[in-house]
Image: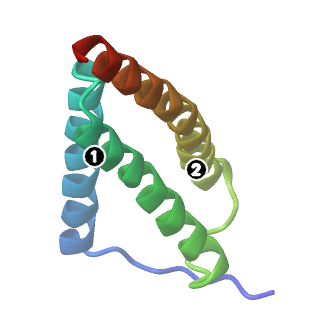
């Protein structure tokens, strides 16, 4: 098997840094206001996007290997998606009970 080494230029590094900062801000805001359903869905989408990105780099583009540096974000994204999908069910139940109290 051949080993590919791809150089990252400054623009790519800064873009990835801005993406990381943006997703962190979104996730922190969701943690502060976890009952905000729109923000919850946006946060969940950031984890799906991260998972898709890292999986595509490993299996489609072959620009990353399954090392601990790639497996860590894959595991964080996967466990976060599972946890947030479970949490989403509680948000739905809470929204239904709030509607019943109003009626």
Q: Position of residue 6 (x, y in %)?
A: 47, 80
Query: In the rendered view, does 77 fall on the left or right side of 17?
Result: right
Residue closest to the eye, 73 or 48: 48
**Residue 56 sits above or below residue 23 on the image:** below
Can you tell which mark lies on residue 75? none
Q: Secondary structure at mark 2?
A: helix
**Residue at x-position 29% and y-position 24%:** 35
Mark 1 or 2, closer to the camera? 1
Q: Residue furthest bottom?
A: 2
Residue closest to the eye, 34 or 53: 34
- Image quarter of the C terminus: top left
Label 1 vs label 2: CA separation? 18 Å
- Image quarter of the N terminus: bottom right
**Residue at x-position 59% and y-position 51%:** 74
Q: Secondary structure at mark 1?
A: helix
Please report contact status of discs 1 and 2: CB closer than 8 Å, yes or no: no
Q: Position of residue 77 (x, y in %)?
A: 53, 46
Query: In the rendered view, does 24 fall on the left or right side of 57?
Result: left
- Mark earlier in primary sequence (1, 2): 1
Quarter of the image for residue 12 reads: bottom left
* Residue ID for mark 2: 69
Local crowd at mark 1 within 10 Å, few (<14), some, or many (≥20)?
some
* Residue ID for mark 1: 23
**Residue 9 sits above or below residue 60 on the image:** above
Residue closest to the eye, 88 or 54: 88
């Amino acid at each position: 098997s051949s080993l590919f080494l791809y150089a990252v230029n400054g623009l790519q590094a800064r873009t990835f840094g801005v993406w990381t900062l943006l997703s962190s801000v979104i996730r922190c805001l969701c943690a502060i206001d976890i009952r905000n359903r729109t923000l919850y869905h946006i946060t969940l989408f950031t984890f799906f996007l991260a998972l898709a990105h890292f999986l595509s780099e490993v299996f489609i583009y072959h620009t990353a290997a399954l090392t601990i540096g790639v497996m860590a974000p894959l595991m964080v994204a996967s466990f976060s998606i599972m946890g947030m999908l479970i949490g989403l069910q509680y948000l739905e139940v809470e929204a239904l009970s709030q509607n019943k109290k109003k009626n």
